Amino acid sequence: MIGILIALALSWLLLYVFEKKSLLALGWLPVRKRTLQFVLGFCFTALLCVLAQLLEGFLKASQWVVHQDSSAAGVLNSVWWDIKSVLTEELIFRGALLYILIKRIGASKAVLISAVAFGIYHWFSYGVLGNVMAMLFVFVGTGLMGYAWALAFSKSKSILLPFGLHLGWNVTYNTVFSKGPLGDLLLVSEGGRAVSEGISFLNFSIGMTIIPLLVLLFVVYGVKRNSEKQNEGASIIQNRRNE
């Protein structure tokens, strides 16, 4: 939680110093519209994750079952962990810095820089630094996903859409299918057989290329481009209501 507060404080400082803007520049308003974007983004990537895990189970001839030692407290703790980690990453990669870059060098270059930085960041978070092939796959996969999320920010003029897209995948992957750092939670894989290297590569490729490309297509064709004037208008209306 402290990390999020620090990220918010730094975001406010950067926005004020470079653009004379408040945190509202990140597109928190209007609330109803942004909430809907968040929910749609969350549901889309959550569904993709479910389909990917079902396909993996099919390829391995395994099945997903409810973890017998699963507890509400453990699941909620994992969801909270996902929220904190995702929000922190969004504030860093799709927050004030991306907003400023879009203003200074244009959306196309800014989105690309954000994607490259996100891909490189995952070399360290995934612990693959030094393994050239792993670095390549991680960079392509997470870079593509980062590009889609940065483009979502650029088109919607709001951090909530990429936050929803990011959180939907992470909560489903980490908490529902127990593939995160907190261990077995809601569902666990049971049974199955050893698979060939080809099947393993296919499954890995789906997660690193097909899924990010589907998210990118969703953003390109499913997200309407918004203007910042709409955000500013909503902010003014909200401020007047609070007076």
Image (cartoon, rainbow, N blue to C red):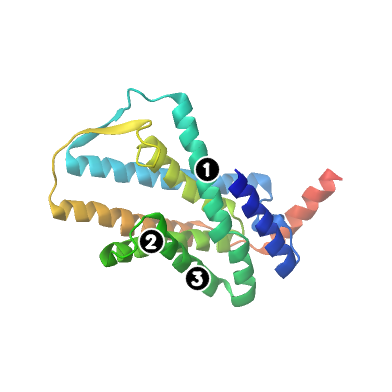
In the rendering, which numbered label is found on residue 123? Answer: 2
Q: Which residue is mark 1?
A: 83
Number of other residues with Cα within 10 Å of mark 3, as a class: few under 14, some 14 to 19, many 20 or more: some
Q: Position of residue 40 (x, y in %)?
A: 51, 46
Q: Position of residue 123 (x, y in %)?
A: 38, 61
> Depth-wise, is mark 2 or mark 3 nearer the camera?
2
Tally of marks: 3
Q: Which residue is mark 3?
A: 113
Q: Is residue 224 visible?
A: no
Q: Position of residue 219 (x, y in %)?
A: 47, 58
In the rendering, which numbered label is found on residue 104? Answer: none
| Viewer-side residue, 11 vs 159 | 11
Q: Position of residue 222 (x, y in %)?
A: 48, 56
Residue at the spot 49% in from the left edge and 33% down from the top edge? 77
Q: Amino acid at mark 1?
A: Ile
Q: Look at the picture and state if 114 lies above or below 206.
A: below
Residue at the spot 28% in from the left edge and 64% down from the top edge? 131
Distance from Cα at disc 2 to Cα at disc 3: 16 Å
Q: Amino acid at mark 3?
A: Ile
> Depth-wise, is mark 2 or mark 1 nearer the camera?
2
Residue at the spot 44% in from the left edge and 61% down from the top edge? 121
Q: Amino acid at mark 2?
A: Trp
